[in-house]
Amino acid sequence: MELENKVLSREIQTMFYESGKTLGTAESCTGGRIAEAIIAVPGASEYFKGSIVSYTNEVKENLLGVDHQLLEEKTAVCPEVAEAMVKGAIKTLNVDYAISATGIAGPGGGTREIPVGTIYIGFGTADDVRTIMLSEDEGRDKNLANATNQALLSFLEFIKEKIELPQHEG
């Protein structure tokens, strides 16, 4: 695991540890790498409940509640599916926050409309989900590493807005 991901995971832990809030992930193309980065920090079990690796549309529909028509009309690689995956993970895993990833890591599978390297990251709460799009194709391994890193970084920025750490007297 990249050192930067471990640093980001530690920062996420700091935000969650005393907040009482919980986190889960719903991952497609990243296949559990985001969850792996989160649990690399000892003590993650205090706030990280789990992950759903939804590599197929069937799993996205059945476990995360992603709308079949949305998948048919827009494919799994769109911001709406990333958002639906966040909301589905929050509901299914019974967590306060979730992170999702859906995309085409490569080397195959891309189209002119959705080229290899297109990955949508979702993150947020049931009421406030945000998405970002990655579009660089640097090869499968690098695409997945970039997606994991961007997911952690973007989520950390998001929770810094949302979670207020208790002030310690000192």
Image: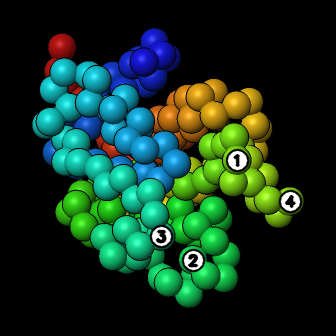
Q: Is residue 135 visible?
A: yes
Residue identified by numbered label 3: 57
- At which x and y percent is residue 8? 43, 24
Question: Which of the marked residues, 3 or 1, is nearer the chain's N terminus?
Answer: 3
Q: Secondary structure at mark 1?
A: loop
Question: Which of the marked residues, 1 or 2, is nearer the chain's N terminus?
Answer: 2
Q: Judge the density around disc 1: few (<14), some (14-19), many (≥20) Cα neighbours within 10 Å.
A: few
Alpha carbon distance from label 4 to label 1: 12 Å
Alpha carbon distance from label 1 to label 2: 20 Å
Question: Which of the marked residues, 2 or 4, is nearer the chain's N terminus?
Answer: 2
Residue at x 43%, y 44% (from the top left corner)? 31
Q: Secondary structure at mark 2?
A: helix
Q: Which mark is residue 71?
A: 2
Picture quadrant where residue 135 is located: top right
- At which x and y percent is residue 138? 74, 30
- Mark 2 residue type: Leu
Residue identified by numbered label 4: 112
- At which x and y percent is residue 115? 78, 52
> Taking 110 as reference, is 159 above or below it?
above
Residue lying at the far front of the rendered structure: 108
